[in-house]
Image (cartoon, grey):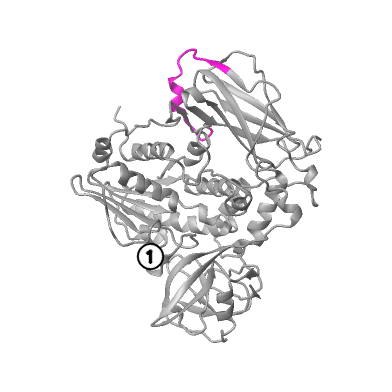
Amino acid sequence: GTLVTCNVNSPFSNSLLPLQHLDHNTVSALNWIKETSDQQSLSPTTKTTQKHYCDYEHQTLSKREQAEEESLFAAIQWPNPPVGKIPFVRSTDPAHSNFVIVNSNVRFKVGDQLEVRVHMKDFQGKPKQYGGDYIQARIHSPLLKAGATGRVVDDQNGFYKVFFTLLWPGEVRVSMSLVHPSEGIQVLQRLREERPDRVYFKSLFRSGSTSETTVCNVCLPGDLPVCNFTDLYTGEPWFCYKPRKLSCASRINHAKGGYQKDLLTPSESLFFQTDVNIKVPILPSGPDSVTVELLGFTANLDRSQGPAVFPLGYYYQDKWRPRTRWIRHFNKTADISECLQGKVVHFFGDSTIRQWFEYLTTFVPDLVEFNLGSPKNVGPFMSVDLKHNVLLKFRCHGPPIRFTTVFSSELHYIANELNGIVGGRNTVIAITIWSHFSTFPVEVYIRRLRNIRRSIILLLDRSPKTLVVIRTANVQELGPEVSLFNSDWYSLQLDTIMRKMFSGIAVFFVDAWEMSLAHYLPHNLHPQDVIIKNQIDAFLSFVCPSET
């Protein structure tokens, strides 16, 4: 590929990316581009004003939005290693590190707090003097198919405290894993700010027998003409390099272009090694389990209240038990049909909420998918149950989205879709949006959620009985390459922002994060059916809450 530059000046967002490598076909087309453009009212336009960088930080925000953004950045602030490059041998080594259960031989009972101390060391076995490592922690009892997550506190001196609430009786084991060392987190932060182009997109333009493909993104670098596909209603920016022969209005689809390679220096790549420092277990220096006794009345443990409740739920006998509300378990298809009778259910988002649509369509015999001729795994999709008058609909969120091919006419933003819904007591909306934003500075994600939130508030204002459910992010399997694009650390940051931005309005959360982290199955971007089933139970418990 040849290195090219191009610039964008949007009326909604001055957004430019660093230089990027383009595919050979696109570069060939770009060499023909002239400094002219199509200017059409209320249609894609071309802008060529000179800019030098992707100016995410200087969006026009109200004082209230500025204050919120500062609060969000404070919530996701992460400790950095000391200034300067840390050699690999001085980075965190999970094999040399260990954890200790505090007071492991005391008599624990259900409801008690368990404290674990983690001590991090480097590859020379020397104690770390600073924090910033990303640790995932859980307690579990394999025979009971029980599990819960832990709360990690970074002392920022190489030591970490992890707190668990003991929620069931029996032998309870502690498991710790290092997801990324602090030195790797520093690299992920750099990539997020400096290389948001490391996933690139493309669009096909066609008119008659002439077709061209160009690269697209939230913003594009340089001073070549671009097509401005910024959404007219939300102001969400999206741009493609202008085809050399065709007009911007001839775009017919959107697709993931690919992933940039060679993002790391040789020394940085050492911080991302399978079985060395990516999701590697940290072993105990003593016992790794405690015995918990069932003493006294403990039913209130499943009905804890307040924002400080942690964890928000746990597994027991492979069933999810939220601690802040009752949950129903929909084991029979008839129960689901009865719950959804007369309802229209909208699923908006990425492939992780498409799993909900697919699970319900597969599990409930009366739900039949109506063939809309949509591309596989892309949508839109629709299932109908004529007997019970149920309609399920799935639609993916607007760009950026890393699906194979989406027709341009089907690139709909969630906020605009919500604005077109009447709502009411028989309307249910489920939303998730996170995974496809992991490579971008968080300002891009905040802007998207702000638009969605505004539309939710308007919908609930005109139709207060509409039910809106937010599905959170989840953990996934990681390797050296996936870590650079979809690390759990990126997902955790976005998940934190999502929860804060949707708190305080009348929406409900299905905690897919804890439900994926607390379970015994291997982490997967698309969790297995037993986890999806528990997510569906939690979702339907909002639709049809228990009457007892």
Q: Is residue 267 left or right of residue 202?
A: right
Q: SS of the residue at dot 1?
A: helix
- Location of residue 282 by image quarter: top right
Residue found 55% across the figure and 62% down from its top = 61
Q: What is the span of residues highlighted in magenta in the rendered image?
A: 291-308
Image x and y of residue 422, in percent: 29, 56
Q: Quadrant of the N terminus?
A: bottom right
> Does the rendering let one see residue 546?
yes
Given residues 72 and 321, the one toward you in this image is 321
Vertical placement of residue 262 versus 488, above or below = below
Residue 322 horizontal/vertical position (percent): 44, 31
Image coordinates for residue 240, horizontal then vertical, percent: 52, 73
Q: Does the stretch in magenta take in 31?
A: no
Q: Which residue is mark 1?
A: 410
Mark 1 surroundings: few (<14), some (14-19) or many (≥20) residues within 10 A: some
Q: What amino acid does circle 1 point to?
A: Glu
Where is residue 455? Give x, y as percent. Answer: 40, 57
Residue 539 vs 403, above or below: the answer is above
Does residue 81 appear left or right of residue 293 in this picture? right
